[in-house]
Amino acid sequence: MVDPAVNAANPSGGEDPSRRDFIHIAAISAAAVGGAAVAWPFIAQMNPSADTMALASVEYDLTKIEPGMQVTINWRGKPLFIRYRTQAQIDAAVKDDGASLPDPQTDAERHKEGKAQWLVLVGSCTHLGCVPTVGGGDYQGWFCPCHGSHYDTSGRIRKGPAPTNLVVPEYAFLSDTKVKIG
Ligand code: FES
């Protein structure tokens, strides 16, 4: 039944266009709210779970590592190298700061807070992601046996197909003996 008030304002007898638009917009809005309600559980499922969030950052006690040694820990599903460099390894890296490097960086740009003895690196070869072995290769840093990439004691690519240096992740020292990665 036609509302007399509406009919008075619309003597042609047809439905008021503005009223029709309002109903149309209201229907779209209801559909959008319904869509959001359906979508939310899926979006919520895509958020990382609490245990995944816990793995997003990891703390490590550096007293467990001897000079010249490296530990490999799991971080966000990837290997992470923490290497305690000797003075000779640091000196070798600094000496090559001016060498021709495929991905130029000084050694100082690859460690933090003046703690040159600690290198923290993502342990994935930047070529195709193999895990390089420590201490090998022509530069005594890391060697990736998959296709022969040589990294120096700063984790810089020096020879082979890897295009860039081993990645330095976000990290900070919580104390002289504790580092937090991520
Ligand atoms: S994955 Fe390391 S050289 Fe190819």
Image (cartoon, grey):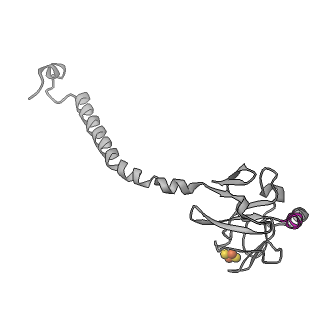
Q: Where residue 119 appears, x then y in whole percent? A: 76, 61
In the image shown, does 73 or 64 lie closer to the viewer? 64
On whether residue 134 falls in the magenta region, the answer is no
Q: Is residue 139 above or below residue 97?
A: below
Describe residue 128's horizontal placement relative to residue 48 as left or right: right
At 15% from the left and 22% from the top, the residue drawn is: 11
Describe residue 9's horizontal placement relative to residue 56 as left or right: left
At 88% from the left and 67% from the top, the residue drawn is: 88
Q: Where residue 124 appears, x then y in whole percent? A: 66, 69
Q: Is residue 28 above or below residue 70?
A: above
Q: Does residue 102 appear in the picture of this structure?
A: yes
Residue 30, image quadrant: top left
At 40% from the left and 54% from the top, the residue drawn is: 45
As drawn, the residue found furthest toward the front would be 63
Q: Where residue 5 appears, x then y in whole percent? A: 15, 19
Q: Is residue 160 above or below residue 29?
A: below
Q: Is residue 167 above or below residue 24?
A: below
Considering the whole magenta stretch, tell me its main secondary structure: helix
Describe residue 2's horizontal placement relative to residue 98 as left or right: left
As drawn, the residue found furthest toward the left would be 1
Q: Which residues are magenta?
A: 86-93
Q: Where residue 180 appears, x then y in whole percent? A: 66, 53
Count of numbered circles in the view: 0
Ligand 1 image position (quadrant): bottom right
In the image shown, does 155 or 35 lie closer to the viewer? 155
Q: Does residue 106 appear in the picture of this structure?
A: no
